[in-house]
Image (cartoon, rainbow, N blue to C red):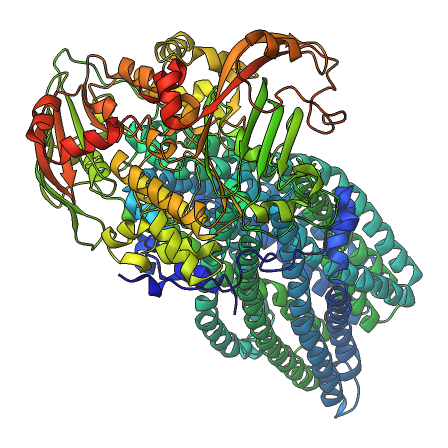
Amino acid sequence: MNPTESAAASPATRRLLPVADGRRTRAHLRTALRPRRLLLAATTAVMVAESALGLVGPIAIGWVTQAIVDGRGTSAVIGPVALLAAAAVLGAPATWASNVLLARVVLPEVARLREDVVGSALALPVDTVEAGGSGDLVSRVSGDVERVTEAAQGGLAGFVSAALAILATLVGLASLDWRFALAGLLAVPLQAYTLRWYLRASRPVYAAGRTAEGHRTSALLGAFAALPTVRALRLGGRQYARVQDASLAAAGYEFEATRTATRFFGRLNVAEFVGLGAILLVASVLVRSGSASVGAATTAALFFVGLFDPINAVLGAFDSVQQAAAGLARLIGVLDATPASAPVPAPAGSPEAAPRTARQPVLALDRADFGYGDGPDVVHDVSLRIAAGQHVAVVGTTGSGKSTVATLLAGLRAPRRGTATLDGVPLADVSPAALHGTVALVTQETHLFAGSVAANIRLARPEATDAQVAAALDAVGATGWVEALPDGVDTLIGAGGHHLAPGRAQHLALARLFLLDPDVVVLDEATAEGGSDSARLLDTAATTVLRGRGALLVAHRLSQTAGADTILVMEEGRVTERGSHQSLRAAGGTYASLWEAWSRPG
Amino acid sequence: MTLDALPLPPRPATASPAAPPPPPPEAGRHSPRALLWGALRAQRKDLVAASALYSSHQLGESMVPVLVGATVSEAIAGGGRWAIAWWLSVLAADFVLLSLSYRYGARASMRAKQHTGHVVRMWVTERVLRPAGGIRLAPGDLLTRAASDAGRVGAFAGVVAQTVAAVAVLAVATALLLGFSLLLGAVILLGTALLLVVQDRVARRLRRHSGAEQHEAGKAAVLAEDLVRGMRVLKGIRAERTAAADYRTASQAALGASLRAMSSQSLLSAVGTAFTGVYLTVIAGVGGWLTLSGRIGLGEFVAALGLARFVVGPMQVVSGASAAYARAVASAGRVLEVTGTREEVRDGLRPGGFEEGRGARVEVAGVEVDGFSGVSFVAECGELTGVVVDAPGLAGRIPELLVRESEPAAGRVEVGGKAVGEVPLERLRARVLVSPHDAVLFPGTLAENIALLAPDAKAAEQGTWAAFADQVIDTVPGGADATVGDRGESLSGGQRQRVALARAVAATPPVLVLHDPTTAVDAATEDRIAGRLRQVRAQEGLTSLLVTTSPALLSRCDRVFFLHGAAAYEAASPGAPTQGAAANGRAANGDPVHREAGDADGSGADGGTEHSRLTLLITDSGTHAGLMRDNAAYRELLTR
């Protein structure tokens, strides 16, 4: 009935990134908060003081009431009023300090968590992130982080101060007369039952709500990030409907959560009435029998009325804790998904360039098999070796596994069987820092990062000087058009910036590669996107970048690969021919016919 | 696999959008405030209900201490045997009132909140997707506005209901207190007014800081999105650590802003605490003195104190409302930056469209765009026309001109004998389909992507065949039902291009414009695609335009136009380049320098009064074989 039904249903069935379980989440929290336990203790102490000051109000009022009942003179108000004034004066700095301290405990921890999550996500295999959809990840580092922060700040502050207020009030009630406290406690079983019911009922609603919000993010990003295609194909209506469905679904869960919450608070109202009614009833009996004063009864009843808000706050805090836990579990799930061997720690200083050695490393695949996910092998028994300065080319029809081989050699994917090695060491065991500057892969992916042209180039070597960036642009012949941009190398490009044609994006990728100066480059159709716009420029640039390095070239424009030392022909995931351009042409096999198709003059 | 399994698109692809666009935010066109109130107005029924119910809930709550006071003085300090039962049932009735009011009030408020947020989100979405274009913000930035900012505008709906209720309860409480004692009532009124003034002062600082906090947090979120999307590029050059460090910097900046905002927030809370304490002190003092001197009774004193404590909450709601309003207006402003974006092109006003018929002739004559002039070519019905451009950056502009994604500075663009500017955009784009060079796929299966725009199953099958995408379906595990990822990233570049091409051909548009459709496809496959494309398109009498440098595609074209640059010249005023074209003495096709008055409208050119440096393009045309034979520049470009 709805065109987006099938499209909207598919994300649900995807392999989303993992979500941590409760035990794992708590363990992480404990570890994370350990270094801050002193600050946490100080925060709690200030909160206790703050709550104690809050109790002065009812006590002072009880005194006044008693003075009235006892028929004392007007001077009787002076003592209690002085006490109230003192509490007010001391309460303000206590409130300030507890808020500030709590922020210092919570906010840096949350910031670190989101940095770790982004770092971990970047270390994950591309396939893992893309299987779940990048929207899922983005909604975790934005929406879920926001929820956790809110809950940790609002929820925790509310929880601690309210819990302390309740405790102190109960003590206060008991010190007035234990029978009042006992009457008030009648509410507790009701509250405990209600809380248990609520936590059970609301947990799935919140979890589903968070997932629905993830889908909403995916739908929005899907529409916004693909805008040129959406507009060209007039898919605006469909994307609009998809966003609408996802947005309404997310709103539906929010509303469902409210329905549950209002039922929860309704039941709490019953508990409040039971407790208050019991205190008033007990008071009427005790006062009549003369075993309690009217002042004490008033104080007790007001104590209990004063408990309504803190109790709701505590129970409500369970609610935010539960919401935060759902978000936290999604964040920690990302951390846990990262293979332990390959985290991306954010470097403390500027990452030092790996020291260059004079020797040229040898990069090799040996009898490598690979398949995606649980799927069948798409690369079978591929062996190749790139020694110093050697150029190896892989050709073949699309879908024959060329790009997969390129990612295996670059170490972005690990073979199922066989090995991918750098100087004999499996690539998986080589640290990212050692691989940086050793082997680099440039594909036909033309993503530009939002930022200046220079910043995009500098991604390769953050420590590069302006002169080095300029030299890289110059080397690949991009200086001309870059300087013609509105602000030259400072022109903002990427999403939201100056639009660059895909060919120019590729040109910048080659300049980046030149700046990185790796020993071995893997170019997977890196100049293909030139198309009509800048094919010639890109070819020259690629030649410059390849000079003096080992290289694996994947290209379908055979003129680019004809000069390689060795050419591998791939068909259906296997290497079927291997040799130089001349020998393969002479052999009259697949390569010869590919070359025929390519070089036919039209 | 057989292609019978390809699902039909649920609706005809060429028809209007799947859902009607929402009413444009008429009221919210000009100012953030108008947008905010416009969004709220749509939810007024729920807002009124929520306000009324919240008010009765608050009144019920405020009656609790009053009833406790009454119970103490009427049933505990004195009164008859059954007095306690009577007062307890009055209390119970009050609890029923307050509980039910809250339940339905909160639900109405949440409805208003969610619907307002949803409506604003859909306004943003509609504007971003609108055919007339003009949106330049980054996807991550747009996301923040459609998600967080829309949510904040919605959240204000909840604040409205709470504030109305707080004002109501303050009024009633004040009236009650005035009834007990004029002096007490006056103290409370004065205290409320003072509290509001002081809090507003402190809140101003908070507003500034929380604006900065939102800004920094937004920047960090946008960066995260950008990094995740560019992950393949990052991984290729092992820049994950650099990227993580960049994010760390952004996150720490956001943290700094949050801490500053929190310190203002703490100050605000401290002022609140101090003021509330002083206020209670004054009331207890004055009330106690009044009672001790016999001017008011015990019950009234207890009730007054209870009320005074109680009204602190509503007072804070009222004083917080201005900050919440400021936040909502700030978010509405960010929404307005999207919804109020100027449209890139003006929609064609002339009603009607094209004459019926399979194809439509396309003619581009003397167009000036991006510093090039003399862009001219023709594409006939039933033919495959190739356009080869040897001018950096220009090739991508040509498809855009045909569907008016952007306007040329000068020149004539006609489809089916009509100037494209005169036809409504929707009709133009239904007629002319452009498959962009970097076309992305959508979440879903291969089959769903291919059939996305197809009028029927046969067309989907034809598109699949023409683009040689049947081979993709055969190779990919899962076949036609394999999912392609968020943007098609689970396919290889060549597979993705063929699926995108299949999708475009399957749409069977009268005019199909393809920009470098096979850059990631090998020559042998490209050749097969070219042959099949010709068979599917030309035989049906449809018009096809290929902007490409692929010899395999061009060799199957009926006619090829080769646009390449001549000397640059200074254009002083419209019409000046005529001599340049003549001087070059080459066979320029069409009428390269024909201009029409008024074309500069809205396109950023200043009517020719400014001197601009233009490169005049020469157009050579012929068959691919002929050009290869006779044109050295063409041969050199295509055989690199």
| Quarter-of-image position of residue B301 | bottom right
Residue B621 image position (x, y, % from top left): 48, 24
Residue A96 image position (x, y, % from top left): 60, 41
- Left or right? Give the position of B175 relative to B107: right
- In front here: B187 or B479? B479
- In front here: A292 or A114? A114
- Left or right? Give the position of A228 relative to B459: right
Identify the residue at image location x=51%, y=17%: A490
Identify the residue at image location x=34%, y=65%: B5
In the rendered image of this protein, does residue A524 appear above or below residue A377? above
In the rendered image of this protein, does residue A523 appear above or below residue A332? above
- In front here: B536 or A566? B536
In the rendered image of this protein, does residue B628 appear above or below residue B234? above
Residue B320 image position (x, y, % from top left): 72, 49
Residue B74 visible within the image: yes
Identify the residue at image location x=65%, y=38%: B420
Residue B148 visible within the image: no
- In front here: B515 or B98? B515
In the rendered image of this protein, does residue A316 appear above or below residue B535? below
- Left or right? Give the position of B115 relative to A105: right
| Quarter-of-image position of residue B612 | top right
Please identify the quadrant where the C terminus of chain A is shown: top left
Residue B101 image position (x, y, % from top left): 71, 74
Identify the residue at image location x=32%, y=60%: B481
| Quarter-of-image position of residue B186 | bottom right
